[in-house]
Amino acid sequence: MQQPDKAALRKALRARRKALGGFARHQAIRRIEAHLERLARGLSLTVVAAYCAFDGEPELDGWLRRHRGQIWLPRVLPDNRLAFHHADPPTACSRRRMPRTNRFGIIESGDPRRRGINSLDALLIPLVGFDARGNRLGMGAGFYDRALAQRRGRRPLAIGVAFADQQTEALPVDPWDQPLDYIVTDAGVIDARPT
Ligand code: ADP
Ligand code: MG
């Protein structure tokens, strides 16, 4: 059977993500945040790269407010690499407090303090799609594949965040695709680390 191509899957899964609204969405996000909180505590995650939601991604504002460690937000550099800039957890993704947005309209930190990927405990990565083996479908620019390719050790952990509905049977995988260690959804946490 021919593999479904990434572009077609991306379109269908983005539409599904955007269609989730109202109380169901609110409930799902609360569950995601509760699972994320438990995972972060279990793994002693202190220095965490988070994300500010767009395109229907789960907003993690509640979790950010409760996070007792550091938050760093990705900034897209002109050469498509990511740099991680300091943000205050409670206001990290507040439009009022964080006026700077990138070319996609995503909130970025204007704080000059930055960290390289290898000094982070974990990256929270918003997903368009995923499968149970930890394969990730992103928006199609490969930003996180490029960033994760720079990892030198077991950390940072790559933690995908998605609604359970974003799961597919088996995603097509390209040679440059970097797998996830964990996936947090409203249905729970998937441990996808290689055994
Ligand atoms: P996404 O991961 O966002 O779903 P893809 O996996 O389709 O998107 O990757 C998008 C593009 O990113 C690909 O064209 C690929 O060439 C590029 N890319 C991924 N990783 C790297 C890397 N380590 N170096 C350079 N380009 C990369
Ligand atoms: Mg990829």
Image: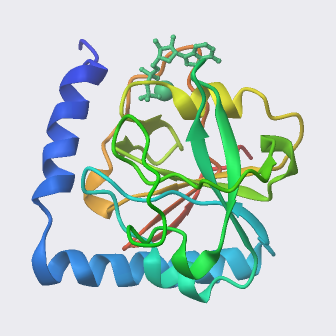
Residue at (23, 31) in percent of width and height: 9
Say whether residue 178 is left or right of residue 24: right
Q: Nearer the viewer, residue 131 or 156?
A: 156
Residue at (33, 57) in percent of width and height: 57
Q: How many marks?
A: 0
Above or below, comparing residue 77 to residue 126 in the picture = above
What coloring was used for the rendering?
A: rainbow
Quarter where residue 39 is shown: bottom right
Say whether residue 111 is left or right of residue 136: right
Residue 60 placed where, x, y %? 45, 72
Q: Nearer the viewer, residue 48 or 115?
A: 115
Q: Nearer the viewer, residue 78 or 138?
A: 78
Question: Image quadrant for the N terminus?
Answer: top left
Residue 143 placed where, x, y %? 54, 30
Above or below, comparing residue 174 to residue 9 in the picture = above
Say whether residue 106 is left or right of residue 151: left
Quarter where residue 69 is shown: bottom right
Residue at (15, 37) in percent of width and height: 12
Above or below, comparing residue 140 to residue 41 in the picture = above
Residue 36 placed where, x, y %? 56, 75
